Amino acid sequence: MFADRRDHARRRQAVINANPGLQERELIKLASLAAAMAQSLTRRGVPEPAAALTAETAVAVFKVAFARWLDAEEKKGLADVIGDSLDELKTLSAGA
């Protein structure tokens, strides 16, 4: 979905970063996404609080990976950056 839209996404993010109201709206959208994912996981039999933890983690990984993808000079795809971020999280959590 974002593959050919990096420049647009960068411009969009710059506008959001410059406007506290849009930052708040973006956070609300991400929170709503996490809530919807948690509900979906619960419907699939994942117990709470594991469903909420998984959904919140997924949103956090996406948020960090998206920022990395926007800032990257290389043309690595968003899916690859998300994968790298997940790998980093796994490494960090294995050492905890």
Image: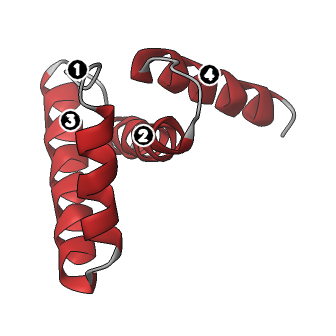
- Which residue position holds label 4? 84
Label 1 environment density (alpha carbons within 10 Å; few <14, some 14–19, many ≥20): few
Q: Residue furthest bottom?
A: 20
Label 2 environment density (alpha carbons within 10 Å; few <14, some 14–19, many ≥20): many
- Which residue position holds label 3? 37
- Which residue position holds label 1? 45
Front-lying residue, 40 or 24: 24
Which residue is drawn at the image coordinates 15% and 54% (left, top)? Answer: 32
Q: Mark 1 to mark 2: distance in Å?
A: 29 Å
Is residue 9 positioned above or below 23 on the image? above
In the figure, residue 31 lies in which quadrant?
bottom left
In the figure, residue 22 lies in which quadrant?
bottom left
- Which residue position holds label 2? 66
Viewport quadrant of the N terminus: top left
Whichever of callouts 2 and 4 sits on the residue coming sooner in the sequence is 2
- Asked whether the beta carbons under mark 1 and mark 2 sit within 8 Å of each other, the answer is no
Q: Residue furthest right?
A: 95
- Three-letter code, disc 4: Asp
Q: Mark 4 to mark 3: distance in Å?
A: 21 Å
Mark 1 or mark 2, which is nearer to you?
2
| Element under disc 4 | helix
- Asked whether the beta carbons under mark 3 and mark 1 sit within 8 Å of each other, the answer is no
Q: Residue 27 placed where, x, y %?
A: 27, 65
Q: Residue 24 placed where, x, y %?
A: 23, 76
| Element under disc 3 | helix
- Three-letter code, disc 1: Gly
Q: Mark 3 to mark 1: distance in Å?
A: 13 Å
Whichever of callouts 1 and 4 sits on the residue coming sooner in the sequence is 1
- Three-letter code, disc 2: Phe
